[in-house]
Amino acid sequence: MTQLLLFNVFNGLIIGAFYALMALGLSLILNLSGVINFAHGGFLAIGGYLAYTLVPYLGFWGALVVAPVLTAFIGILVERVLIRRLYGRDPLYGLLLTFGLAFMIEDGTRLIWGAQSLPFSIPDWLSSPLSNEYFFLTGYRVFMVLLVTLAVAALFVILNYTRLGIRIRAGTLDLETVSVLGVNVRVLRNLNFGLGIYLAGLAGVLAAGMLGLQPTVGDNLIMPSFIAIIVGGLGSLPGTLVGGLLIGVASGVTSVFFPSASEAVIYVMMAAVLIVRPRGLFGEEGRF
Amino acid sequence: MPKLDKRTADALVWALLLTAPFWLTHVGGYVELGSRVLIYALAAMALNFLLGFTGVLSFGHAAYFGLGAYGTALTIKYLCPSTPVGMLVGILTGTFAAALIGPMIVRLRGVYFAMCTIAFGQVFYFIAFRWSSVTGGDDGVSAWHRMPLDLGFTSIDLLGNNKAFYYFALAVFAVCAAAMAFLLGSPFGRTLLAIRENERRARFLGIPVDRHIWASWVISCLFVSVAGALYALLNDFVDPRAMRWDQSGNFVIMAVLGGMRSFWGPLIGAAIFIVLQDYVSSETQNWMSFIGLFFVLVVLFFPRGVLGIIQRKAKP
Amino acid sequence: MSLLRVDSISKNFGSLIAVNNVSMTVEPGELRAIIGPNGAGKTTFFNLISGFLRPTSGHITFDGADITDLLPARRVWRGIARTFQVTEVFPELSVHENLRIPVEVASGFRLRPWLSRVAAEAVGARVSELLDMGGLASKADRLVGELAHGDQRATEIIMALALKPQLLLLDEPTAGMGDQETYEITRLIRRLHQGSKLTIVLIEHDMRVVFHLADRIMVLDQGNFLAEGTPKEIAANKAVQSAYLGQAA
């Protein structure tokens, strides 16, 4: 029983780490620019597919490094050309635009790479279990958790110790003051968007290794990201991180006792948070 | 272009709708397409009650549309083979769900509210998908069909006769549209406009904003579930796709495309969208990209919608 | 019995003390002005009275009842109406529609799906009356968002009046106006005060307006109560003078 519980908790942590990675990118963009990036799942898919294409040339590790960066570039381009025009307008338009983008990206990946599932190969030594007793502890899963931890730590460092990061944080609190202080707000938003998309792309590469690749791979991950943000609290990045992990683990634990309810539990958590503490666990008052 | 006064515009719309089965075929359409436009127009107008007239962005209306559809289908299939009863159950289901969820989200605003409506929408999609013993899961609810309308003195065959179904749908549409117009022109409707225009001012005029938003939400979901009930009847079939997030987006884009600030805007938006979707999906496999592109273009170039452009040109 | 009594009210935003233990008593029918240098906490004070903000400490009593914890909409029902520093109206609706809404709300119709002919006529009559009071009859069908600043402000004031309040709070009614518009608004306020025995509290920077209209004046400085008295007393008050001059120095 403990073995089963441990297995599911660990699984839950991995899923939670994914949700958190996605949700962090989404949250970054939402906090600074006020745009709900519905196409986030699409960028995740792009990250995975680009990695798939690059593996024959750069190997797994090369693809892991390059694909998210390329995805981020695409994101920066999209922001520059399309999303930038919507700032200051009703949030309705941002949502509709990213909605349309999500459609286009999904169909686009289907066009370029085909509709069938593609296998994504990871280095052999990663996929073997690390111990016989804890068979579920494959190298890849541990690797994923480590990588997500690394990414989150790097994000923390960027946001707290680099000029870009500090400006992003300041901008989230008071964009007008930041612009008056001479910061180029357009560039800031652009780079922030790129950063968020980088995280999506990275999640995409990792997901490819675990789930394989289809055009709809982003669909399943975007809703939990939303819920991670709602549970963790709008406007709070630590909240988003905690939210993602929390719903992942809750989902994992529930699957031990009520397997069919494991997906539903994250919605129940969302409802509970909305009733008891609408601003989320770490949310700031008045943000909505 | 001279601005049509309201009465003339209304008369024109009804004239076109009443005679549609006769001129549709001459322009390359078919009666069922007309029925479909009516249904989506009703859904978009219902959404617009909340979006365009109260100023609240809901992106999860497909859930209540779907509940209306499933309620109708399941009732006719398993409980009572009667069209009106099926519809009633569908409408009650959708409305009841909305009334329950409303209080949870009515204090939220802007993007946060939108996110939560999307998430709740997903809950119902997920239930429809998973509870396959009842809903048939991905296969949907099939092997049933719309029942003839038994009016006592006569029975109208809705199934075999496309025209009859069109007029039935039109009758339902008319009742709903009239009800919505009536509400919007009432003191209550004006408080909704106030909330849209300036929520703070509305609050400081003594309007209990959250309560009124909840009322608008429930009314909006009620009419969208009526549309859902008709949708089930039109297709003699329902599956989870009726409730998916992309369906919600479709309703919004129809309202925006036609013009959010006008009563008939969503009807025009629905007409354009459905016709376009019909055409594109018959021409190419990649209709999804086109629809997506369509969304992007509307947002960038037609944010005020077709009627918005006409109104602006008509202003002195 | 005084209409409004504010007892030692304070508002802190973290470590920033915006309003510090300020008390005020307003008698029915009075026109009270609140003045003070920039940053004195005047608007915050208003926000506390109207329910926009919750006080950190202190009480507010209106017409004998404690309203400290009441939500804004409820205070409106009790008889407190306000205008804002930045005019808050319904920009894409006409003046007529802007006024009709508060009239309907004040008549208890806000949830009505339908009005009888009699009721509708009563509403129409009241709106006409208000339009005349504000000098807006000729602009009734124009969209408020398109009106001149002075007319927008007049609309806002008349909207507040439509609620039949006992207490009217006006936040810098002549802000951003030129001489002519300031004159018109001042005349409007005077007309309202004298015509309907309304109790008015207003925040103002323009001293001409203050001394022309006010029965009593209260002075705030950096969130603290500084002085209160008749216009004459305040004009002669040394502390008030130094507060203003000190700012300019």
Image: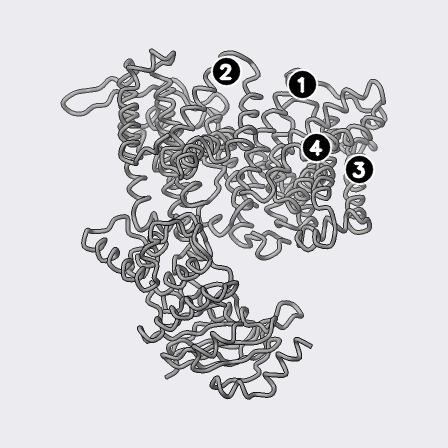
What's the residue type where badge 1 is placed? Ser
Mark 4 and mark 3, same subunit? yes
Name the mark on residue B281. Answer: 2
Estimate how packed mark 2 is, as few (under 14), some (14 to 19) or many (20 or more) residues with alpha carbons within 10 Å.
Answer: some
Both labels 1 and 3 in a single chain: yes
The chain that hosts pointer 2 is B
Q: Determine the chain carrying the residue at label 3.
A: A
Residue B294: x and y in percent read 53, 25
Q: Distance between the residues labelled 3 and 2?
A: 42 Å
x and y percent of residue A201 in the render?
73, 32
Identify the amino acid type marked 3. Leu
For the residues labelled 2 and 1, the Cα–Cα distance comes to 24 Å
Left or right: A85 in relation to B209: right
Q: Nearer the viewer, mark 3 or mark 2?
A: 2
**Residue located beneath label 3 in the image:** A147
How packed is label 4: few (under 14 Cα within 10 Å), some, or many (20 or more)?
Answer: many
Tag 2: amino acid? Ser
Q: Depth check: B254 or C120 in front?
A: C120
Tell me the element at label 4. helix
Q: Do labels 3 and 2 share a chain?
A: no
